[in-house]
Image (tube, rainbow, N blue to C red):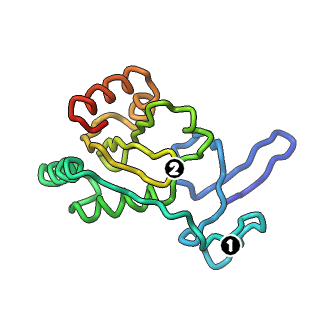
Amino acid sequence: RNDKVDTKNGILYVSGLDLVQGTQIIDKKPYTKPDISPEATIPGWVKDPEKKEEIKVEIIPQASKEVSELIATKKLEFYNSEEEVTKLIGDVFTQNPHSKSAISGKKCGIFALCLDNMEIVYKINDLFNHFKVLEVNECKKSEKERMAAFRTESWLVKTKLRLQERKLI
């Protein structure tokens, strides 16, 4: 919720966000249908919130097996079944959290994100409408360490080699 706008200092005060205190907000997005509360309005520049680009989410069999192992060994904090994790991954990717301009310069197209205690490694096709989950690993690092790790060249090189050895790319 927008609480206050300080136009003099260029500060937007917000509340009700799932952020660590002091986290910089780089980009604010419009409401989508599931986010809307009864008193919310949709800005006029949002064309049609009902119409969404078809996005395919594919979890390869080995990645599904890795999810099952994490569940069986009680490594996940919030999810207890492969169905719940599959739905979570599908929900996240169908919202397409990437901007085309941010990822268009990436040559290898390998990305990762952390959900619960999982590091989810995936590829995106050139049309940005097909997400392919290649592997799901346990992620024991703190949130800050997780995000820093995904931005390093060494993470990318190690991940690319591992995926090549497994013949996933």
Which residue sits at x=71%, y=65%?
46
Q: Residue 50: x, y in percent?
A: 60, 73
Q: Count every numbered label the image shows and give the total.
A: 2
Q: Residues within 10 Å of mark 2 (few under 14, many from 20)?
A: some
Q: Quadrant of residue 165?
A: top left
- The residue identified by callout 2 is 128
Instruction: Point out the tag, 2 or 1, that comes first from the N-terminus.
Output: 1
Which residue sits at x=64%, y=55%?
29
Q: Nearer the viewer, residue 16 or 27?
A: 27
Q: Quadrant of residue 154?
A: top left
Q: Is residue 12 above or below residue 24?
A: below
Instruction: Please tell me whether mark 2 sits on a helix, a strand or a loop.
Output: loop
Q: Residue 135: x, y in percent?
A: 27, 43
Which residue sits at x=12%, y=53%?
72
> Cα distance, mark 2 to mark 1?
29 Å
Asked if residue 29 lies left or right of residue 145, the reply is right
Q: Residue 93: x, y in percent?
A: 44, 55
Q: Is residue 27 above or below residue 88?
A: above
Nearest to the eye among marks 2 and 1: give it: 2
